[in-house]
Image (spheres, rainbow, N blue to C red):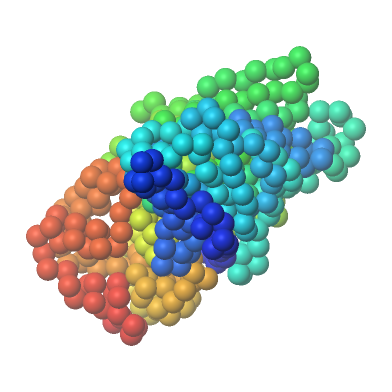
């Protein structure tokens, strides 16, 4: 992801929780309410406790003419405790009905929390299925720095299904979710620590494309003038990486030399400017597989939005979204590198963001090093010297705070997380040498594939894998308050 800042969630009323607390059989409490947040260091109300989601099946119908989204979310989860009630994150949208295990369930809304009480308590270890019917006009959230996330409409040219070309008929949309925007278009456990597999079906007017994560399983033209696109993501995904894109996109498909499927969707007017950077995507997938280990997903690709839709690129799983034509091949490489670091190996909390952005930034340096540009050492030295001739970001505030300890949620996408995070990795490389360093990088991606990891997990792993005491690197570069030298 590119630099941006963030925002956050609300709490259910105490009275709501008290009303849902006890269910007894023979005087024994069978379940208790699941927590309405996971106490993330920066977003304490993000996500929910008491269960883990295994799979989301989202059936979404979107009409660009009126901006209405109607959805059915079927969420298969496993109870981690006895549950008398549990919460889902959902912002806006009207809930029309909820069932749990096929039986109608009571529910109430408080802020961004949908609290569900099953007809019968759920037992610890029980796999249960929740179905939520909902609809309305999804929200766009504004983060602390003014950037947008959630459900964002696009007015992007190209005639809609009626051919009249009015602005409303031509409107498309994109769903993006870092850190919490996915709750504006589907209910869920919206914290990166709860990853799940996905099936996302999007039905839109004929003449529009509908793009999501993973593999396109089917495209069905209906007699009602609408088209259904069924997307399947078999690998676990954090909900902030889910996307839904609707618009008159130009789609191209292909394969990398080693056989990974490619799917690119480019907005009208952006095709020519995007061609150069996207043409290198197959090469980048192959290069990353050599540097970091096998590409972790079955498909790769990109979505190029109409210029001005967003102020940032985002590493949505298997198909990063770009805010107009990518300005450089390094930006494409950065978002692709996240497929290993951030998407396959996801953070345990939002405080661990440097493990996403530091690795993706260092991947840019390695790409340049391997393709006739400045070496990673030259990038490192440029930041120490503020030499923008080597790296235009070298005079940024990369030393403002330690990358593992951003001062607050509005700083988790600031320069130190990216550039000083990359410098931490280069300091490890300096300490242990290339052979051990690249074995560490590949091992980290392999051993934590499709899982979650924290900064503490990484520091322990790095020391074990390299056999070196790296305490000075952690103390000075990762956690140190002073400018490293």
> Which residue is pictured at 73% across the width and 43% down the height?
136
> Which residue is pictured at 36% across the width and 35% down the height?
126
> Which residue is pictured at 44% across the width and 77% down the height?
407
Q: Is residue 473 left or right of residue 347?
A: left
- Percent across and percent down for residue 31 are 39, 46
Q: Is residue 189 left or right of residue 150?
A: left
Q: Tell which residue pokes out farthest to the bottom in this image.
A: 482
Quarter of the image where one finds residue 24: top left
Quarter placement of the C terminus: bottom left
Q: Is residue 128 left or right of residue 445?
A: right
Q: Is residue 94 above or below residue 435?
A: above
- Percent across and percent down for residue 98 are 59, 37
Q: Is residue 355 visible?
A: yes
> Which residue is pictured at 63% across the width and 44% down the height?
185
Q: Tell which residue pokes out farthest to the left in this image.
A: 467
- Percent across and percent down for residue 157 are 79, 41
Q: Is residue 295 visible?
A: no
Q: Tell which residue pokes out farthest to the top in this image.
A: 223
Q: Is residue 150 above or below residue 161?
A: below
Pick the front one: 232 or 97? 97
- Percent across and percent down for residue 393 are 48, 70
How many tags in the picture? Answer: 0
Pick the front one: 305 or 136? 136
Q: Is residue 99 above or below residue 206?
A: below
């Amino acid at each position: 992801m590119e630099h941006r800042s963030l925002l956050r969630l609300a709490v259910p009323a105490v009275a709501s929780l008290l009303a849902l607390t006890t269910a007894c059989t023979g005087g024994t409490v069978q379940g208790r309410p699941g927590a309405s947040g996971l106490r993330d260091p920066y977003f304490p109300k993000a996500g929910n406790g008491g269960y883990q989601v295994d799979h989301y099946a989202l059936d979404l119908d979107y009409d660009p003419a009126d901006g209405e989204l109607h959805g059915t979310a079927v969420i298969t989860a496993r109870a981690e405790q006895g549950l008398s009630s549990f919460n889902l994150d959902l912002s806006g949208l009207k809930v029309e009905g909820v069932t749990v295990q096929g039986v109608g369930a009571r529910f109430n809304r408080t802020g961004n929390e949908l609290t569900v009480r099953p007809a019968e308590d759920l037992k610890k270890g029980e796999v249960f299925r929740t179905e939520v019917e909902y609809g309305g006009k999804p929200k766009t959230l504004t983060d602390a720095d003014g950037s947008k996330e959630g459900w964002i409409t696009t007015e992007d040219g190209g005639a809609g299904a009626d051919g009249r070309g009015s602005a409303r008929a031509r409107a498309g949309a994109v769903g993006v979710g870092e850190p919490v925007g996915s709750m504006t278009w589907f209910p869920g456990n919206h914290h990166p620590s709860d990853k799940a597999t996905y099936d996302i079906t999007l039905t839109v007017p004929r003449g529009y494309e509908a793009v999501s994560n993973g593999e396109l399983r089917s495209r069905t033209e209906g007699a009602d003038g609408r088209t259904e696109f069924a997307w399947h993501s078999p690998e676990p995904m954090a909900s902030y990486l889910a996307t839904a894109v609707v618009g008159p996109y130009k789609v191209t498909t292909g394969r990398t030399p080693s056989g990974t499927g490619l799917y690119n969707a480019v907005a009208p007017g952006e095709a020519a400017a995007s061609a150069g950077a996207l043409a290198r995507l197959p090469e980048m997938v192959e290069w990353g597989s050599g540097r970091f280990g096998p590409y972790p997903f079955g498909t790769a690709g990109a979505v190029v939005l109409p210029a001005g839709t967003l102020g940032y690129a985002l590493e949505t799983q298997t198909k990063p979204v770009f805010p107009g034509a990518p300005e450089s091949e390094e930006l494409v490489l950065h978002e692709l590198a996240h497929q290993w670091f951030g998407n396959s190996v996801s953070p345990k909390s939002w405080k661990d963001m440097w493990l996403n952005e530091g690795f993706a930034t260092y991947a840019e340096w390695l790409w340049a090093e391997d393709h006739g540009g400045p070496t990673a050492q030259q990038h490192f030295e440029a930041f120490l010297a503020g030499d923008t001739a080597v790296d235009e970001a070298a005079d940024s505030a990369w030393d403002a705070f330690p990358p593992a300890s951003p001062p607050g949620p509005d700083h988790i996408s600031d320069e130190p997380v990216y550039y000083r995070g990359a410098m931490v990795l280069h300091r490890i490389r300096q300490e242990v040498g290339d052979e051990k360093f690249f074995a560490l990088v590949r091992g980290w991606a392999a051993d934590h594939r499709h899982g979650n990891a924290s900064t503490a997990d990484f520091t322990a792993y790095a020391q074990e894998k390299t056999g070196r005491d790296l305490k000075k690197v952690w103390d000075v570069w990762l956690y140190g308050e002073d400018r490293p030298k």
